Image (cartoon, rainbow, N blue to C red):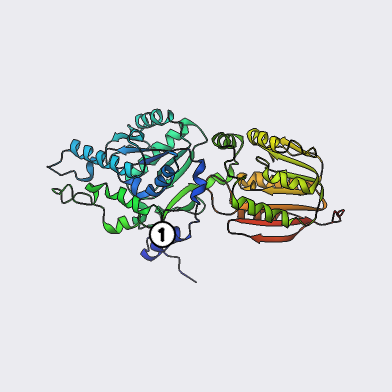
Amino acid sequence: MAMVPLPTDPGHVAGRKDALYEQAPDHPVGDLAAWRSTIVFSPHPDDESLGCGGLILHLTDRGQEVRVVFVSDGSMSHPNSQKFSSEERTALREREALAACSVLGVPEDRVHFLRLPDGRVPGEGHPAFAPAVESMTEMVRQWSPDTFVVPWRRDLHEDHRATWDICRAAVNRIGPGIRWVEYPVWMWEAKNTGDLPRQEEMITWSLDIADVVNRKVEAIRAHASQWNGVIDDDASGFQLSESMIGHFTRPREIYFEPAEKRHRSLGGEYFAAIYQGSEDPWQFETSEYERGKYAATLAALPLGRYDRALEIGCSIGVLTEQLAERCEELLAVDVSEAALERARDRLANQIHVELRRLSIPQEFPEGSFNLVVLSEVGYYWSYTDLERAIDLIQNSLRPGGVLLLVHYTPYVPDYPLTGDEVHEAFARKLTGFERVKGSRADRYRLDVWKKKGLTRSHG
């Protein structure tokens, strides 16, 4: 019988950390488009550059709003210095923070300092915790953020854990709907697997920063007091070792999100915000990727024509227009009225196409179909809603009817599920169906299912 390694076994801990880095699915940079107003919370000046400098650069390079909030005053890195008083150390750290943020593309008016005491940031239960939460909430509410990027909840430094507590309490006051992402700093120095995320607790993903890593290193080096001996009269003072800096100069950054997001569907408010920013947020009209995927989707249909078809999630109607050529009747539904308005303009002359606003699975169209197309929709549902939708879809299909699934497969932090999870759920839950086609391309998966029984042929 194999022995279970102790949580403090050095080889086991190192192996777990290596696996976190190596096995985290890549999050395509292009899918950061929905992060329109992001706040990065840095317990100390330098954590923002170390933990998520690459993310900040990708966002600011795209012209998206990023603010950085420094929580502690950073004064205790060299508490015994005689050359630099506590006030001078704080001023030095703030100058370095502004220089680093400038490298990261964050202007000075979007850099903020809470100046809580370094080494004593109040965590939950501390008398100063409630005032800190109040101050944080009052500050960030005015910015209408959609994303909080916060330190890993079990990072080894107490100020990092206290920052997490304050941010969590602030989000609870502001209300639901804020994207919550955690980044590790001191976790990479952990010596116990209990300090690492558990699979059932967090979803781990990575961001490719190879093309911006040199600028990230420049931002890290801007915090010279933390690595370059700028404060040279305190032998006990903190200095970042080159081995620790090495964790953060690799070509990928690691992030965590609470696994509970799998149980919350994205609804109308999410898509309203997406379409408010762009009439074609996923470039359906112009993308070569979309054009190739549409061609593969239509080529995968086993019949030439269909009596009555349902397209779930038609968006602005680009695929709908092409499906219409293969259908006697086509009902195309979407949760977004803004998207449907674009689709109505596109399909104004297609009298056999009906466009309708529906929120599936809470609503579902009447009647039966011999074709249902679910393209780039299933990962917006929670597992519960996905299973409800599967039941509704399979019950609505006539004998011999076709179900076509096509979904983007890379991990997207915004989405409750991945494309593969959607397709595997259909494979588990469909009853009385046979898969007649299954294929993968570089970034999407396509499956065609046929309900057993006879159907009228249309060539």
Q: Is residue 274 visible?
A: yes
Q: Residue at x 45, y 43 (%)?
A: 62
Which quadrant of the structure image shows residue 21? bottom left
Compared with 148, 234 (above or below) is below
- 1 with respect to 451 (left or right): left
- Residue 226, position in %: x, y? 24, 49
Q: Which residue is mark 1?
A: 17
Compared with 299, 262 (above or below) is above
- Residue 63, position in %: x, y? 44, 40
- Residue 373, position in %: x, y? 72, 48
Q: Residue at x 28, y 34 (%)?
A: 115
Which quadrant of the structure image shows residue 181? top left
Furthest residue in direction bottom, as rendered: 1
Q: Residue at x 42, y 44 (%)?
A: 61
Compared with 13, 94 (above or below) is above
- Residue 158, position in %: x, y? 32, 44
Q: Residue at x 82, y 57 (%)?
A: 452
Q: Is residue 422 visible?
A: no
Identify which amino acid the numbered label 1 is placed on.
Answer: Lys
- 457 with respect to 325 (left or right): right
Which is nearer the eye, 297 or 162?
Answer: 297
Quarter that holds the C terminus:
bottom right
**In the rendered picture of this protein, how many numbered marks are placed on residues?**
1
- 215 with respect to 419 (left or right): left
Which is nearer the eye, 316 or 131?
Answer: 316
Element assignment for label 1:
helix
* Number of residues whose C-alpha sits closer than 10 Å to that of mark 1, classed few (under 14), some (14–19) or many (20 or more): some
- 296 with respect to 104 (left or right): right
